[in-house]
Image (cartoon, rainbow, N blue to C red):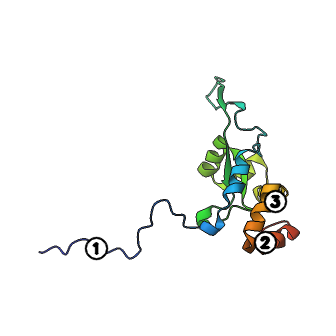
Amino acid sequence: MKRSGFLRRHTPIRRKGKSRFPRRRCQPYLDWLKAQACRITGKRTGDWFSWLPLRGFRTVYYPFQIVVDPMHVKSRGAGGQDLWNALSVAHHLHEESHRIGVKSFAKKYGVNLEALAAEQTRQWLDTSAGRAWLVEHPEQSGVIWGASERGNPQ
């Protein structure tokens, strides 16, 4: 039996380094989030934190330095964008949210992640960097101002 060669792909391979969702990205906002305190622990990047893992009857503390990451409530792959959807959390908590899921994470820590993300977006839009970004991207103004009046994104 003769081979016909490689099968043709129906979908083209995406080029590396190019975003699939360029209009949903707001890099100045993500950079600002990294400089903020964690919304769960209140710690900032560089602060020390002791973590108590469950090790049976022994109590062992592991000290480590906090790194704050932006966490998306609705993933970007699922259609989430940066504004009204991202908040600053410590890296180990961000990993935990991926491990147990966003809904379980919010229930475990007793927080409303959507409300925290909306609050942080409002704080950023009140800064000069947020206002400058909005002037450069007028297509986002309808979504942002319409959402801020109701308290959540459209």
Quadrant of the frame with the C terminus: bottom right
Say if mark 2 contacts mark 1, CB within 8 Å.
no
Q: Amino acid at mark 1?
A: Leu
Residue located at (88% from left, 70% from top) = 149
Answer with the quarter of the image where residue 123 lies.
Answer: bottom right
Please state the horizontal and vertical placement of residue 79, each as a whole percent of the image. 63, 68
Which of the two labelled residues, at mark 2 and mark 1, occupies the earlier sequence position? 1
Looking at the rendered structure, the secondary structure element under dot 3 is helix
In-image side of 43 versus 53 (left or right)? right
Nearer the N terminus, badge 3 or badge 2? 3
Q: Measure the alpha-carbon separation of dots 3 and 2.
A: 11 Å
Q: CA distance from mark 2 to mark 1?
A: 46 Å
Residue in the picture at 83% in, 55% down: 127
The residue to which callout 2 is attached is 141
User: Alpha-carbon neighbours of circle 2 within 10 Å: few (<14), some, or many (≥20)?
Assistant: few
Q: Which residue, given by chain and number where applicable, does mark 3 sit on? A: 125
Task: Using the rendered view, name the quadrant where residue 6 is placed.
Answer: bottom left
Q: Who's the residue at 67% across and 62% down the image?
A: 74
Identify the residue under disc 1: 7
Residue 121 shows in the view: no
